[in-house]
Image (cartoon, grey):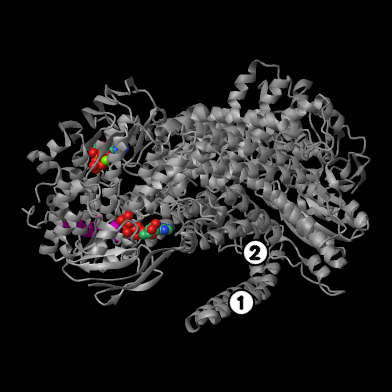
Amino acid sequence: MSGSSTSPARVAADQPTLWQNPILLFSIMAVLLAVTGFAQSWLLALTILQLCIISAIMTLGVNVQWGYAGLFNAGTMGFVALGGLAAVLVAADPVPEAWVAGGAGIGLSALIICATIAAIMLVRAYLNGLLRFLATIACLVAGYIVFGQAFGPATEAIEAVNPAQSGYLGGMGISILFGWLLGGLLAAGAAWIIGKIAIGLRSDYLAIATLGIAEIILAFIKNEDWLSRGVKNVTSLPRPVPYEVDLQTDPAFIELAANWGMEPNALAGIVVKLAFIALFTLVLVVLVHLAERALRSPWGRMMRAIRDRPDAASAMGKDVKRRHLQAFVIGSAICGIAGAMLVTVDGQFTPGSYQPLRFTFLVLVMVVVGGSGNNLGSVLGGFLIWFVWVQSEAVGFALVNLLSSGLDPSSWLAGHLTQAAPHLRPVLMGLILVLALRFAPRGLIPER
Amino acid sequence: MIRVTDLHKHFGGVHAVDGASIEIKTGTITGLIGPNGAGKTTLFNVIAGAFPPTSGKVELDGEDITGLPAHELFHKGLLRTFQIAHEFSTLTVRDNLMMVPPSQPGESLISAWFRPSAVRKSEKEISDRVDEVLDFLGLTHLVDERAGNLSGGQKKLLELGRTMMVDAKIVFLDEVGAGVNRTLLNTIGDAIIRLNKERGYTFCMIEHDMAFISRLCDPVIVMAEGKVLVEGPADVVRKDERVIEAYLGVGRKQAAKHEDTAPSAQGATP
Amino acid sequence: MDDEVKLGIILGFSGPIESLTPDMADGAELAMSEISDSGNFLGGTTVSSVRADSTCIDAAAATAAAERLISAEGVAAIMGADCSGVTTAIINNATVPQGIVNISPSATSPALTDIEDNGLFFRTAPSDARQGIVLAEVVMDRGIDEVAVTFTNNDYGQGFADAFVSAFEGMGGTVTLSAPHEDGRGDYSAEVGALAAAGGDALVVLGYVDQGGLGVIRSSIDTGAFDTFVGGDGMFGTSLVDNLGADLESWYGTVPGSAVGDDNPWPAVADAAGVNHEGPFVGQSYDAAALILLAMQAGGEATSEAAAANMLAVANAPGEQIQAGELARGLEILAAGGEIDYVGATGVEFSDVGEPDGVFNEFELIDGSLDTVRTR
Amino acid sequence: MIDVANALVLLSNFVLIPAITYGAQLALGALGITLIYAILRFANFAHGDTMAFGTMLAIFLTWGMQSLGWSLGPLPVALLALPLAILGTIAMVLATDKVIYKFYRDKRVDAVIFVMVSVGVMFMMNGLVRIFIGTGDINFADGSRFIIRAREFREMTGLDEGLALRTTQVITIVVAVAVMASLFWFLQKTRTGKSMRAFSDNEDLALLSGIKPEKVVMVTWMLAAALATIAGVLYGLDKGFRPFTYFQLLLPMFAAAILGGIGQPIGAVVGGFVIAFSEVAVTYAYRRVFEYLGPEGFEVDGLMQLLETEYKFAVSFILLVIVLLVRPTGIFRGRIV
Amino acid sequence: MTLLQANNMRGGYGKADILQDCTITCDRGEVAVIVGPNGAGKSTAIKAIFGMMGLREGEVTFDGETINGLPPQARVEAGMGMVPQTNNVFPGMTVEENLQMGAFLREDGGAGVIDKVYELFPAVFEKRYQHAGELSGGQRQQVAVGRAMMTEPTLLILDEPTAGVSPIVMDELFDRILEIAKTGVAILMVEQNARQALEIADTGYVLVQGQNRFTDTGAALLADKEVRATFLGGDQS
Ligand SMILES: Nc1ncnc2c1ncn2[C@@H]1O[C@H](COP(=O)(O)OP(=O)(O)OP(=O)(O)O)[C@@H](O)[C@H]1O
Ligand SMILES: Nc1ncnc2c1ncn2[C@@H]1O[C@H](COP(=O)(O)OP(=O)(O)OP(=O)(O)O)[C@@H](O)[C@H]1O
Ligand SMILES: [Mg+2]
Ligand SMILES: [Mg+2]
């Protein structure tokens, strides 16, 4: 939310300084991770790197919307959550009993929805004026009542199937990698519908509308237990990479570890994380490549023109609404993919974890700090801000240890400092954000 | 070419356009003048699809185009410029023009990703056209400048340049002259005349500079209070009592001698 | 042998339950310092704690924090996490892969019972499923057969409420409405309005005492919607009484903790150390940390393997009963090769998957203090 | 007749009074947000935490006064602490402006940068408040909690339904009305107020009219800080203080400001009440109301609840989206920057 | 001693200097007009005089005092008034409030002057309760000039006041400007309607690329063939 029909990039930019060289900045990022590896541990560095990549993918999605098209989507959280839901629907084991109990009812409900929509379309095609309005309402109400008759009992039946362990329909039980695809599609579909409704709104109003819609999506996911298991969470989703425990018990692996002079546990952790990282990197590279191509093409030129002056672009024959919708859908799809990837690496879907601060505003911070309108910039922003987000936790605790090292551990001050330690994290995070913006107000790697 | 019938546009209680009917004939440069707040810009906005009218009808070559969105009108050959220049400020001058032609292959993501050669080919063609246009406008030296850094008059030239990137049927110009240096305005006037003569564009332009209007336009339509007051050739219109009363005024003593001198379109045309 | 061993404490110091966690951490650290100070632990090894923030909700951040504890700080075992979601993430992505024991003091999701943990995960809070039944019995026994239920909208609250409602209705009771509330919000008029309209003789609040649970009860008392309140373990704590004072008239519920009767020394032990034991899960945190260290002592080394291998033996009979504040004695017995049956602050008794098998105290507010009236 | 009275009392007790109180609190918060937006032209994410900061100061002062044995009789002592807390918050906010925001203002950066900077400030304040006062729930309302209790009301009137009225509710409403009225008077009628509106409209031109920008900025921050502190203290008195809750208030406050038309003070007020009422009224179970109003012995089986309370948060946003679709710039036509 | 002396100004927005040694002066009761091609730096010069951008070199004195360091609002207090070229109204305030803001520094609130402004611009009077943002281009321009007049400054700076206004209003405006000048106010004006402006100008400046190219009386400049051809639109008449 900002007064932001002013384009994200400003005119009359000063020339990029040496500091804004992408190669240099990414090297610094690599050094930061390497330092983490040496000073703390490589497992930690890799854990952070995994999420850096996922964050970068999210920022890429937001950048398509905000950086390219100037659309202020404050509903990233909703699309990320939808991506997560998709991963569940694909990878979780199906619950046959639930399907037996309520599958038919759910199918029937879906049919009723379709029938209602068809009826409304018919009504709207053949009737006019007040009658049309009344008939539409009548169809809606009738549809809703009939739907309730089928849907209510069906969901109750499903949720009654072993509620402590399942209580939902489950997924398809296939590889979670397909969930990434479905996550993109699901998010894109939702974005299409939302965009159709909301894309005409201007800057801050679009922001708050999308923010609200994201909350609605989340309320749906949290409360429609039959589909998503709601706040009871779906855990232990299968991985596309081997499990550490399996590696650790594999004699060949143990031997390998011994040959390399490493602990099998540590090596297994590193191998698994590297496998994840390889998968994620592949996605990131493909997406960055496509995004760069798009941005440098006439498409990108058109999008920037639309962002600068939508009315003039429209007068030059560009269908602003359609293009906004396109950017909105693509950006959301990317966020959906990232959401599915996040669930993959976490191994679980916990609707309670979707908070606007973490999944909307932090991602926006990543884009702006990195450099909106610039793909590499926003990727860098994703890396850097996630790194800071995670490491500020450790730094907060370390700082307090340092401060209270000379104190008597039972003294009031020492106790107070210990309590305060976790809250140094947001302080540090805020400080770094403000400092970054002070020295690079247009982002670390600004647009062009 | 354009026929506007009994057009109304109301903003709340303000009747900005209040039953205007005008006709713009193919091949003319039609002037639109009138006192401040007469509803000229609003009329333009309605015709060009910026917002729909309260009532009334707009036709283009006999086809009803009332309320069509701007981008569709563009594809029908109707172009407009803005009273305040609407350049794409973060784009270079070249890109400002490059983005204009419709239906470029590279504007579809699929082609942008998977048919680079087709994109390259069309880019080359458009780029050649841009060079021509910039040459024509005398902006070649600014080709890589960000449009936001141009001065007022240069931005207006750029606005005009956009209309030259496609084969428009009709171009609406909203006060290209305001705030533009008179010498530069003459150049713009020449450009308009050339486009009209050589490429057969039809123009409709709002302007307050009577000398400029007289040099370029025939016929001239005078609006007042949302309605058409008079229509006719420039020198007839400017002698019309009602026009003098509502718009031109009797002229200040000092300025009178300039106002009275008859303009000549050829005067400044090279 | 090291002369210092590190234990990780990973709790949601920031985020939705940030107001509960500092006391929990203090509880765990109390056990650690008790053991350290005794000088009996593995021949004088001292224990230090390393805190980390689980955020309660952000699985990725929690995983990174746990990874930091394990691989960078080199902790021998972990006390935590708190919320079931992040706990699961930590188990799957950090502790089990690295062979580290962790004990959660507060993750109550039934799903954790069956998690593939290689025998490394334990918890000192009971699964919700059992407590729901017990609580239903408590309510029924008081002759109340119509209640409204509100629960915190997470896996704990939802699971607990599911269990309670089905048990209560199974016993012939009526639940007029079972509606969730979100923690961390201030205004609960909408929830209370709906619950009041639904009606009932009592309001069953399955949330956290320092969070939405408090808000709902406060709002109910303010509007006169309900007079009688029933709560689960998350609602146990005198901060409710402190906050609401005499306005709170009828208040009872269940809290895990069996064998310890009224003579439980835990409150006194905590008070002496300046630890606020009134909040939920503080005793469980104390027990979690104590159990890890006692199990290590039993195994003779400060490793997760030792802790995992001896946990059940230390927690369950046979052996000498060890209550809160008696950790030094427990250590001695173990060092001497004896056996102990850890009771601790909450009467720990592990099932064979390493979680309490659910013996509960029925507490009640009598004359401004929370008394145990019965054990079930 | 009795039934009608019962129904009315029921509605007032569970819908009207709580929604009005909550609405007033939201409105005061949203006013601060909308003021910053209108005049400094950015969405201030730190507002929720400014509220927390101000309330924290008020709590410390209240504790101090309580330890001195001060009392206001039935009113909470926090009211005495409020003016001082406002001063403290103003000092903090002005310092923040000088150290942080001024730099960006002088550089005239984009609004979105300001938003991000305010997110940074939000993080910092978020942490600092917790470091100072902790994370727990603090009840600092003393004096008498109730003006009338539900039971007393029942006994007094002989109705079946009770009506409870709390001191803090009355204080909230009275203070909110007074504050809003004086704010409107200030903005519409005083020279400074007009100069602030002018500054918000066109900063450069305001300079050319002789308006001192730094003064406008300063007054704006002072007003925002005062509004934040008042809103925070009222909210805290009524519902208890916890930093996390204040942070969570940010979203409904933004929703209120935007729903009403951002940059429009009157919009913020209306938006606050609309959000509060939609949360409470849409999810209320009307069964008993209908039973009172229906014929004798009339029984309703359902709860007569339009939407379940789990969708309460979504309700306000659904409403918001609907309003925006009908009126794309909010109820009172907010500014589009 | 002249009222306004802006000597050898040098400065710009970024690194490059837009103004290169530019000098402008204007005395009480005098009308000075700046003309020049687009992008010459006319508006920039005016902004510099008004303290809206820093100068690298040069000195601005007003009423004998150096005012280089003063912020714009202090210059308003000192008796300078200005109408910018663009964004010259408060769009969200009514027309009447716009005018009142012009009198922000006047103790009396400008009650008397406002009638004079309404008299001058009847169109403005009709729209006085409408938001300035809803006015047509020319109506806005009138409000903008009216606002600046409200201060009753001793130096009135106008950046293209007649851009977009109809001929009849333009004539009125020039008449009124002359009248104001006669009361002893100094008027500094940038104009693209250069002929009309130079006709009433006591001094005319032709600015090109930030430098004074020609400086003379208005009449003399009008008579200068080169000036006419290159800056005033040639000899069409
Ligand atoms: N959005 C709006 N809301 C209310 N009134 C408006 C709006 N836009 C224009 N008007 C009014 O409509 C009338 C016509 O305005 P318009 O801009 O069309 O005039 P114009 O003929 O172009 O004048 P000018 O020559 O000054 O540019 C004016 O009185 C103006 O105040
Ligand atoms: N904010 C700015 N940042 C950078 N460059 C600017 C800025 N404003 C103006 N310029 C540049 O400074 C030069 C002079 O601008 P200025 O506005 O003074 O011209 P002008 O003589 O007033 O022209 P016009 O007659 O078109 O108004 C132009 O080249 C313009 O591009
Ligand atoms: Mg106009
Ligand atoms: Mg200029």
Nearer the observer, B190 or D230: B190
CB atoms at circles 1 and 2 under 8 Å apart?
A: no
Left or right: C328 with respect to A428?
right
Q: Helix, strand or loop at disc 2? A: helix
Q: Label 2: how many residues lie within 10 Å, few (<14), some (14-19) or many (20+)? A: many
- On the same chain, marks 1 and 2? The answer is yes
Residue A298 spot, x, y in % from top left: 27, 55
Query: In the rendered structure, which amino acid carries the disc numbered 1?
Result: Gly
Q: Main secondary structure of the magenta part?
A: helix
Q: CA distance from mark 1 to mark 2?
A: 21 Å
Q: Is residue E134 left or right of residue B117?
A: right
> Which residue lies at the image location 32% right of the left edge and 20% below the top edge?
E64
Task: Report whether the residue tagged 1 is closer than 8 Å to ligand 1.
Answer: no
Q: Is residue E25 above or below residue B157?
A: above
Residue E168 x, y percent position in the rendering: 27, 53
Report if residue C276 lies within the magenta region. no
Q: Is residue C271 above or below residue C366?
A: above
Q: Which residue matches tag 2?
A: A226
Image coordinates for residue E68, horizontal then vertical, percent: 33, 23
Residue C84: x and y, percent? 67, 47
Q: Tag 2: residue type?
A: Trp
State yes or no: residue B116 in magenta: yes
* Chain of the residue under the numbered disc 2 shown in the image: A
Of label 1 and label 2, which has the lower sequence position?
1
Q: Is any atom of residue A50 visible in this view?
A: no
In the displayed structure image, the side of residue B175 where residue D271 appears, left or right: right
- Outermost residue on the top side: it is A406
- The residue tagged 1 is A143
Picture quarter with ligand 1: bottom left
Q: Which residues are magenta?
A: B99-125
Q: Residue furthest left?
A: B270
